[in-house]
Image: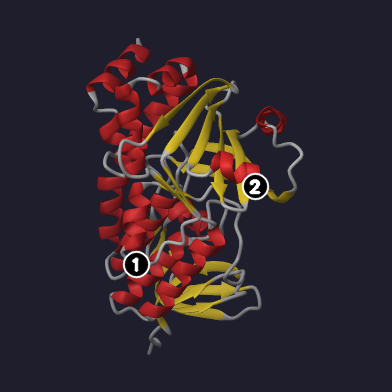
Amino acid sequence: MIAEPAWDVAVVGGGPSGLSAARAAAAAGARTIVLERAEHPRYKTCGGGLIGTSLAYASEHIDVPARDKISALTFTRAGRHSFTRRAASSPFLTLVRRDDFDHAWYSAAVTAGAVVRQNAQVRAVDQGVVTLTDGEQITAGTIIGADGSAGITSRYVGVTFAQQDLGLEVELAATEADRSTWEGRVLLDWGSFPGSYGWVFPKQDELTVGVIMAKGHGAETKKYLAGFLEHLGLSDRRVVRDSGHLTRCRRPDAPLRRGRVAVVGDAAGLLEPWTREGISYALRSGGWAGSAWKDLSRYEHQVTAELAPEMAAGRRMLDAFSRYPRVVHAAMATPLGWRAFESFCQGNLSMAGVIQRPSVRALLTLFRA
């Protein structure tokens, strides 16, 4: 006689995608456990920008711990050609610190009935079994992997990636002058290396400054960040934290599950290729997988129907931006370009919807010529 698994759902990883999955599964009646290698609240360096899609989803389940709400965006190209655009009505971006944000999701998962085991390092997964580094085995009918693109579950499922980028980020102690300068405003700099960009995100007592570039150009990425900080006059600020991380974007034909093991968020390579925005993908994919724990094919179909078109559109935008950054920069200065970007940030327009705008479609057609 085969013993019944101890859990209906075991989630590997306690970030936004894993905790969103755990909350949804527990709310759907599943006996749910989360295996998190660290301990909440745990810090992760991250831009922490919530676009409207993320904010709408999160607000249904948590009190979003906002550090700033953004209504102004300054664009530069290689540190020059600066202009600022402002939201017509409501803010278009909400900034959070990941320790605050992830802990709010931890509380939501626990409130829904999930059990979260901290300091639980996973060594291996298989059908129905998660093995910890101390040899303990957790049995579950469904396993949801949310341990990142370099994690065990992603490798087990066999996720393959079409795009890999290196992000470098520092969090700086903000002076009173910095707070006054940056409150309610972010900066995006289109870098000189194809497809690269930098950012400044204010979070009250800290500024998050980072750059991202295609993997394989580590020296150029470091040079970009150093020059970016110097140009902004921030080189002398105290560095509270710094980190580097890889973002990986899935191939369109990459699997989302292997049997009863599914992957979500970064573990599935789900993010928008141009902006590399991943939190909205993490929250949605995690929630969908948790809700579909009895029939994971529903999760696959939802990702294919709703996220795949956004990612395909993002790839087209990244290609255009990589080849013609000056044109993209100039487009953001126009009312039509800014309104499309603002609508995307506010969650009123998907990336797929952006490229269907007549003006954007005409530009993309020109770029292919």
Q: Residue at x 33, y 12 (%)?
A: 366
Q: Position of residue 293 (x, y in %)?
A: 32, 69
Q: Alpha carbon of mark 1 to alpha carbon of mark 2: how far?
A: 34 Å
Amino acid type of the residue tagged 1 in the rendering: His
Query: Which residue is label 1 attached to?
Result: 61
Q: Residues within 10 Å of mark 1 (few under 14, many from 20)?
A: some
Q: Residue at x 51, y 51 (%)?
A: 48
Q: Nearer the viewer, mark 1 or mark 2?
A: 2
Circles 1 and 2: CB distance less than 8 Å?
no
Q: Position of residue 23 (x, y in %)?
A: 37, 71
Would residue 235 appear left or right of 121 to someone viewing this image? right
Regarding mark 1 in the picture, which secondary structure is present there? loop
- Snapshot quadrant of residue 88: top left
Query: Which residue is label 2 attached to?
Result: 176
- Snapshot quadrant of residue 28: bottom left
User: Vertically, is 47 above or below 322?
Assistant: below
Q: Quadrant of the N terminus?
A: bottom left
